[in-house]
């Protein structure tokens, strides 16, 4: 059982929300991973849907965070707060 | 003895003793995930035992609480089937014991939904959701081990063969079963037997395991005649309340 692969677990807590990463676990295959996730991560009514992905299929950004994400920092016009809203516009 | 009380007490004893056995795995599971899975099942069963004991105590009318029924009876007063008191031994034995019991428990609770006793039918409805998952879990493991490696197949087959003699009692009615089946409060075990036989045959066949040929079946648990295992379970389970009666957290 030491050679069971690692799985990443994503759980949707209710309809309309997206799946969120909650952690990882070991399992021999996808079905066991889902059942293990039910037992490990859904003991207190946390979810209505489970996704599992074998960890080796996850790809993550490895770049230096500052250089990689910095160009977004000075583009203040990408934020809605940059724009002045006329008073006549309602429901914003 | 009141057969209705005796019947409900037995359902509670089955759940309690199996919960205690599964609890022994806590901290000792082969991997953390299965450790949690087994203790989840253990706690489900403990919850069922609590509902059943509380009800049994009310029916008896002598003021005994769930704790008094669990902690202050001796082995001969327990009504659980012999299967649930058998030791964990290894993962394959634990799974075989669970699978045999879950199959019975599932069909039994399903039939109990139609009990004339509404309280019992309500307990069955709540428990059935839990037991449905238990059966799925244990069936899945029988398949994995039976149809796994050569070693896992051998171990699973050995566990199935060794525990087989304790399975007859599950679906063989004693006087209590006959009485509660007749008055509509309990389940007619003779109707459960073919369902149990078919489900077990299906899963074992798919798992490439041999169905043991019928041999001598042990019995007696329902009437309070137990294997030597139960005394050890009770010694551990009841020790604290026997030493310090009424002790609370």
Image: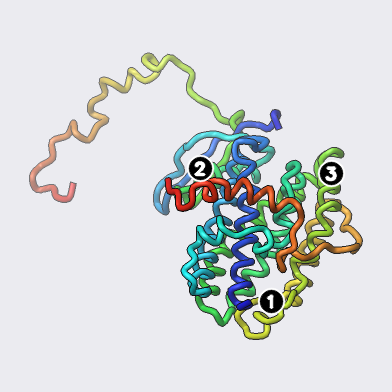
Q: Secondary structure at mark 2?
A: helix
Front one among B52 and A44: B52
Residue matched to label 3 = B153
> Chain for mark 1?
B
**Depicted A68 relative to depicted B249: above or below:** above
* Secondary structure of residue under mark 1: helix
For numbered disc 3, what is the local secondary structure?
Answer: helix
Q: Is residue B226 left or right of residue B19?
A: right
Residue labelled with disc 2: A41
Which chain does the residue under circle 3 lie in?
B
Disc sitting over residue B176 in the figure: 1
Relative depth, front residue between B165 and A87? B165
Residue visible at 59% across and 63% down? B12
Is B149 situated left or right of B184 in this image?
right
Question: Up-down: is B48 above or below A39?
Answer: below
**Residue at 26% over, 20% down:** A74
- Quadrant (top left, top right, bottom left, bottom right) of the C terminus of chain B: top left
In the rendered view of the protein, which quadrant contains the N terminus of chain B? bottom right
Choose between B248 and A40: the one closer to the eye.
Answer: B248
């Amino acid at each position: 059982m030491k050679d069971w692969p690692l799985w990443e677990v994503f759980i949707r807590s209710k309809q309309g929300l997206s799946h969120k990463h909650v952690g990882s676990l070991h399992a021999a295959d996808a079905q066991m991973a889902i059942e293990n996730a039910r037992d490990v991560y859904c003991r207190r009514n946390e979810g209505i849907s489970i996704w599992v992905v074998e960890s080796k299929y996850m790809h993550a950004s490895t770049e230096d965070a500052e250089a990689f994400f910095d160009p977004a920092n000075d583009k203040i016009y990408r934020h809605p707060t940059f724009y002045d809203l006329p008073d006549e516009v309602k429901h914003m | 003895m009141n057969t209705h009380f005796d019947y409900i007490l037995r359902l509670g004893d089955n759940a309690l003793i199996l919960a205690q056995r599964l609890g022994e795995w806590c901290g000792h599971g082969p991997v953390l995930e299965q450790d949690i899975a087994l203790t989840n099942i253990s706690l489900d069963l403990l919850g069922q035992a609590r509902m059943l004991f509380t009800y049994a105590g009310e029916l008896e009318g002598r003021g005994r609480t769930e704790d008094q029924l669990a902690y202050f009876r001796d082995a001969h007063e327990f009504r659980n089937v012999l299967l649930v008191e058998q030791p964990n031994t290894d993962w394959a034995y634990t799974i075989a014991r669970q699978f045999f019991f879950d199959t019975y428990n599932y069909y039994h609770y399903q039939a109990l939904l139609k009990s004339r006793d509404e309280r019992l039918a309500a307990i069955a409805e709540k428990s059935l959701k839990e037991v449905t998952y238990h059966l799925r879990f244990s069936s899945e493991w029988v398949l994995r081990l039976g149809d796994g490696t050569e070693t896992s197949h051998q171990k699973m087959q050995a566990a199935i063969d060794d525990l087989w003699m304790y399975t007859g009692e599950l679906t063989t009615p004693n006087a209590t079963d006959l009485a509660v089946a007749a008055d509509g409060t309990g389940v007619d075990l003779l109707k459960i037997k073919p369902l149990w036989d078919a489900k077990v045959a299906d899963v074992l066949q798919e798992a490439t395991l041999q169905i043991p040929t019928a041999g001598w079946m042990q019995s007696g648990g329902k009437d309070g005649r137990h294997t030597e295992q139960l005394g050890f379970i009770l010694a551990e389970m009841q020790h604290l309340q026997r030493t310090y009666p009424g002790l609370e957290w």
